[in-house]
Amino acid sequence: MSVRAKKHLGQHFLKDENIAKKIADTLTENNYDTVLEIGPGMGVLTKYLLQKKLTTHVIEIDTESVEYLKAHYLNLADRIISKDFLKLDISTILNNEQFAIIGNFPYNISTQIVFKTIENRNLIPELCGMFQKEVAKRIAEKPGSKAYGILSVLTQAFYDAEYLFTVPPSVFNPPPKVDSGVIRLIRKENYNLPVDEKLFFKVVKTAFNQRRKTMRNSLKSFNLSDKLREDTIFAQRPEQLSVEEFINLTKSIANDAI
Ligand SMILES: C[S@@+](CC[C@H](N)C(=O)[O-])C[C@H]1O[C@@H](n2cnc3c(N)ncnc32)[C@H](O)[C@@H]1O
């Protein structure tokens, strides 16, 4: 008996074992001994994680998949969390130890998984996973491209992001409508910002909400001094600015308000 795919849970099960192994092998296994897989489904990726030296935990929202895993992976039984990852209190699980996140993520919550990882980055040195290709590209994109935006800057402020490979719809059951992409995020050594984090998020989001305008126009609502607005950075569009430039800009804005 296998699990019947449920659309509302983003269930597209991998049927190509080689791809499952290739995804499991994207983990560097540096700086952690534990891995948490989000959405194991019927365990095609889990199987390869269990072959590693790491301790594998899984979190799955679908009770039918949980029953399947309990029946087929007897040695995993006490490391299956039957819950919604988005409602999980990360600080209380895994005894506060460092762990990596991996998954063939449900596409409907994949950006929320990234933001929850960023929020809990003190415990998460690495994330490897499969996203809708377009989302994976946006996360790892560099300045100067159309795909570079809020998701790129907010992720890369804390993690080095690398796009690894593309996966076609044909390796899933049922096949999704679009290509998928696998990326790896490795936490930066210095993963706390030298500026107010809330202000940084606000500056980045406000700037990209009007991405075709110059920074001078898109950040009008901040009521900045004329002196600051004369800085050459304000003549540029948000997609031209590096993560470091956004951080420095936030610093200047914070000082401008004093
Ligand atoms: C794309 S499928 C991948 C399944 C399996 N890993 C594979 O590769 O065949 C996504 C999985 O995430 C699970 N899922 C969806 N939303 C979830 C959530 N909020 N928390 C935990 N798991 C979730 C689904 O039930 C499904 O098993």
Image (spheres, helix red, strand yellow):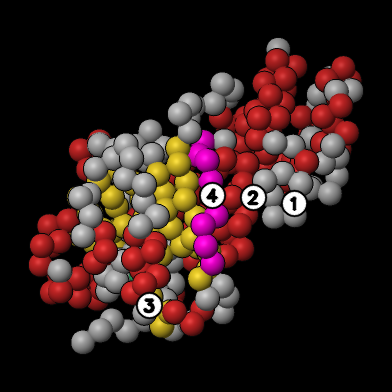
Which three-letter amino acid code belongs to the residue tagged 3? Asp
Which three-letter amino acid code belongs to the residue tagged 4? Glu
Which three-letter amino acid code belongs to the residue tagged 1? Ser
- The image's mark for residue 145 is 1
SS for callout 4? strand
Q: Can residue 67 be seen in this view?
A: no
Q: Give the range drawn in magenta.
A: 158-166
Q: How crowded is mark 1: few (under 14 residues within 10 Å), some or many (20 or more)?
A: few
Say which residue label 3 marks: 16
Say which residue label 4 marks: 162
Q: Of callouts 2 and 4, which one flags the residue occurring earlier in the amino acid sequence?
A: 2
Mark in front: 2 vs 4: 4
Residue 190, horizontal then vertical, whole percent: 48, 26
159 within the magenta span: yes
- The image's mark for residue 141 is 2
Does the CB distance between marks 2 and 4 fall below 8 Å?
Answer: no
Residue 18's place in the image compared with 258, above or below, is below
Mark in front: 3 vs 2: 3
Question: Mark 2 and mark 1: span between their CA atoms?
Answer: 7 Å
Question: Mark 3 and mark 1: span between their CA atoms?
Answer: 32 Å
Residue 152's place in the image compared with 84, above or below, is above
Residue at left offset 38%, top offset 33% = 122
Image side of residue 98 versus residue 134, left or right: left
Image side of residue 81 versus residue 4, left or right: left
Q: Of callouts 4 and 1, which one flags the residue occurring earlier in the amino acid sequence?
A: 1
Question: Mark 2 and mark 4: span between their CA atoms?
Answer: 9 Å
Q: Of callouts 4 and 3, which one flags the residue occurring earlier in the amino acid sequence?
A: 3
Residue 113, horizontal then vertical, whole percent: 45, 53
Q: Of callouts 3 and 2, which one flags the residue occurring earlier in the amino acid sequence?
A: 3
Does the CB distance between marks 2 and 1 fall below 8 Å?
Answer: yes
Label 2 beta carbon less than 8 Å to ligand 1: no
